[in-house]
């Protein structure tokens, strides 16, 4: 089932909302669609790209949270110790900030285009910020 289309850099991915495991986070994110921003490469977490969101408040706490998202999993850190952010894992991730270990809500999973994830991550690392858009399928 495809709920959203995620376009990042030159790539497009189908994505499934994790409605059962993270219903409040999914509902909060859907209110912000279409969501457009830029991804940059993570600084502390390993093989991931992120959207820094400053003090943006999605109005959710922790649910279905993890420190170790798998490739293709997208997590929302609702803020607190560090700024609010969305992270997309393209390889091994140990989610952290300059303040230390963090945990984010796994609310979205990419279901197609996974063969392009690593290339997207490396493109972001070596070429800089890439546009990203989340929209309903």
Image (cartoon, helix red, strand yellow):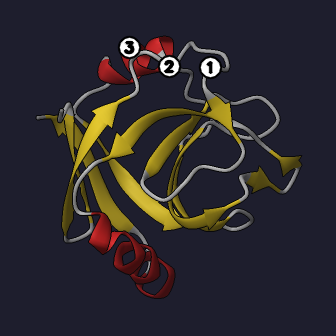
Check the image and report above or below for 88 versus 4: below
Residue 11, x across and y down, in percent: 21, 67
Residue 21, x across and y down, in percent: 50, 19
Q: Is 7 left, or right, of 41 in this rendering?
A: left
Nearer-the-camera pick, 133 or 116: 116
* Upstream in sequence: badge 2 or badge 1: 2
Q: Is 25 left, or right, of 19 in this rendering?
A: right
Residue located 43% across and 15% down the image: 20
Residue picked out by circle 1: 63
Residue 127, x across and y down, in percent: 41, 85
Residue 3's quadrant in the figure? top left
| Element marked by disc 3 | helix
How far apart marks 3 and 2 lie (CA) works out to 9 Å
Residue picked out by circle 2: 22
Please identify the quadrant where the N terminus is shown. top left
Residue 25, x across and y down, in percent: 48, 20
Are the two marked residues, 2 and 1, in contact with CB atoms closer than 8 angstroms? yes
């Amino acid at each position: 089932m495809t709920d959203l289309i995620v376009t990042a850099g030159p790539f497009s991915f189908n994505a499934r909302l994790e409605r059962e495991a993270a219903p409040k986070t999914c509902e909060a994110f859907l209110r912000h669609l279409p969501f457009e921003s830029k991804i940059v490469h993570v600084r502390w977490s390993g093989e991931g790209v992120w959207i820094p969101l400053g003090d943006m408040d999605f109005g959710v706490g922790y649910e279905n949270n993890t420190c170790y998202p798998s490739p293709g999993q997208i997590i929302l850190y609702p803020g607190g110790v560090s700024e609010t952010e969305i992270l997309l894992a393209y390889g091994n991730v140990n989610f952290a900030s300059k303040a230390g270990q963090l945990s984010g809500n796994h609310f979205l999973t990419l279901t197609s285009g996974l063969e392009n994830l690593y290339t997207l991550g490396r493109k972001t690392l070596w070429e800089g910020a890439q546009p990203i858009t989340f929209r309903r399928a």
